[in-house]
Amino acid sequence: MRASSDVAYLSRALKAPRVREVASRLAERAREEGWDYEVYLAAVLAEEVAGRESHGGEARVKAARFPQTKTLDDFDFSFQRSVKRQSIAHLAQLDFLAERKNVIFLGPPGTGKTHLSIALGVQAARRGHRVAFATAHEWVLALGAAKRAGRLESELERLGRIPLIVVDEVGYIPFDPEAAALFFALVSSRYERSSLIVSSNKTFSAWAEIFGDPVAVAALVDRLVHHAEVVVLRGESYRLKGKGKEVMGSEAAT
Ligand SMILES: Nc1ncnc2c1ncn2[C@@H]1O[C@H](COP(=O)(O)OP(=O)(O)OP(=O)(O)O)[C@@H](O)[C@H]1O
Ligand SMILES: [Mg+2]
């Protein structure tokens, strides 16, 4: 009995709560199954490590500020046929993060761009990487505020230390020249240093309209796609799935 209160005290002192939770249960198993001391110690420590990793993972998912939690398991590849399950599964192995590459999702509304961006972001967070999610409009507002406070450079540097930044919805809201310059600063500050996931409803050829400056757009797209996986989604909106007639009117259904 003395030993178990020692374990309770010591695990508190070590800030290792799982050790206390599992120590006696695993000790029982160890006695029943005749484990060596080392096997028992490793089993207890492994529980503590797993507890910390999953806890940290959920904390990182929260810190990323995803608008919802989506995973690849909820994605219906039989509805979205323009992308192969295999290629998304490959992205989910996160080699692109290690290689500091970008992932770009292009496609019309409701085809799964945000869903897939979140799913990859959640995966990265659970695997131990810091992630930050916002729409293009929100990123530009945040960078504009940093600029006005005279700390744009330090903000870009801080963001540069986050290995994955997700920029959703490039193209729904056109950028004024200042916004375009801030977006350019974000992309170029991360170029070959840290990854971006970017999604847009417009193809690159239509980006000049969003940014209003074809020369700057060419330079931006160049940096963005130099090391990138570009995934083009096609087809109907999942939001309208099975609602053709009522929602779109009878012409759309014919
Ligand atoms: N293939 C799919 N399987 C399951 N759910 C899907 C699929 N595609 C889209 N969805 C769901 O449909 C909704 C719309 O998808 P999503 O937000 O990813 O679209 P989007 O391409 O980002 O569209 P928008 O350009 O309007 O932002 C979401 O709730 C998403 O989870
Ligand atoms: Mg979206």
Image (tube, grey):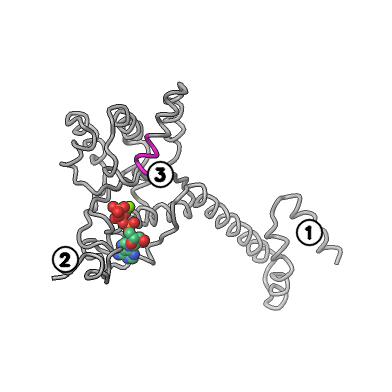
Query: Residue 189: which quarter of the image?
Result: top left
- Quadrant of res 184: top left
SS at mark 2?
A: helix
Disc 1 from disc 3: Cα separation: 42 Å
Asked if the magenta segment contains residue 202, the reply would be no
Identify the residue position indicated by label 3 in the image: 134
N-terminal label among 3 and 2:
3
Span highlighted in magenta in the image: 134-140
Residue type at the position of mark 3: Ala
Identify which amino acid the numbered label 2 is placed on: Ala
Comparing marks 2 and 1, which lies closer to the viewer? Answer: 2
Q: Which residue is mark 2?
A: 252
| Circle 1 Cα neighbour tier, 10 Å, few/some/many (<14 / 14–19 / ≥20) | some
Q: Main secondary structure of the magenta part?
A: helix
Residue 166 sits above or below residue 81 on the image: above
Compare marks 2 and 1 and give the one earlier in the sequence. 1
Q: Position of residue 168 (x, y in %)?
A: 34, 46
Residue in view at x 69 percent, y 74 percent: 29
Q: Is residue 99 left or right of residue 26?
A: left
Q: Position of residue 55 (x, y in %)?
A: 58, 55
> Could you tell me which residue is drawn at 28 percent across and 34 percent down?
175
> Outermost residue toward the right?
2
Q: Please, what is the three-letter code of the amino acid marked with disc 1?
A: Ala
Q: Residue furthest bottom?
A: 32
Q: Quote the CA–CA distance across marks 2 and 1.
A: 67 Å
Image location of residue 214, percent across then percent down: 17, 31
Q: Give the labeled residue for mark 1.
A: 8
Does 135 lie within the magenta span? yes
Q: Secondary structure at mark 1?
A: helix
Question: Are circles 2 and 1 on residues that touch, CB within 8 Å?
Answer: no
